[in-house]
Image (spheres, rainbow, N blue to C red):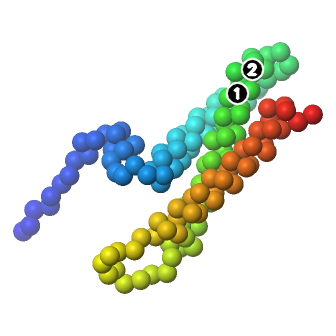
Amino acid sequence: MAEIQRHDNRLGIWGWLGGGRWGIERYAYILHRLTGLGILLYFLMHIVVTSLRARGIYLWVEGGFFHRPIFKVGEFLVFAAFAYHAFNGVRLVLVELGFAVGKPIEPVYPYKTSLNVQRPLLIVMMILAAIFLAVGGYEFLGLAK
């Protein structure tokens, strides 16, 4: 019988973050993971703060704990994470459904890549996320009067 060859993950977290070519797709991948974790952390914090209301502790009343300027910046960062994560998620759904992969072709050398289709979609989605962030941030930071 043939013995199964095993490969241990010796890279740990670096294998999760790195371990490949460093292009715009790798940065989009890392940022998508980090924004997802940030949104999850915000969600858990939101549950805790909201559950404190049942005990009569109101942290968001006027002049309370969450009305400090640092939390305004934090709220904007959550909004920015949401904007990026949402638009990149739409791009990933389009790729997974096959809309941004291109037509299947026979793999003949020199190999063609789907990056010519996926990279412009990534750039368009990031431009849309930046526009969404700019418009929402304009209102969010109180610049609109």
Q: Quadrant of the N terminus?
A: bottom left
**Which x, y percent locates residue 123?**
59, 57
Q: Is residue 2 left or right of residue 37?
A: left
According to the image, label 1 marks what residue?
73
Dots 1 and 2: beta carbons under 8 Å?
yes
In depth, the one of 139 and 67 nearer the eye is 139
**Which x, y percent locates residue 60?**
79, 23
Say if residue 26 shows up in the picture.
Answer: yes
Residue at image position (52%, 65%) is 118
Q: Quadrant of residue 43?
A: top right
Q: Quadrant of the C terminus?
A: top right
Q: Is residue 121 left or right of residue 60?
A: left
Q: Is residue 74 left or right of residue 116?
A: right
| Secondary structure of residue under mark 2 | helix
Residue at image position (28%, 41%) is 11
Q: Quadrant of residue 2?
A: bottom left
The number of discs equals 2
Residue at image position (78%, 20%) is 67
Check the image and report above or below for 38 versus 2: above
According to the image, label 2 marks what residue?
69
In depth, the one of 112 and 99 nearer the eye is 112
| Mark drawn on residue 126 | none
Amino acid type at mark 2 = Pro
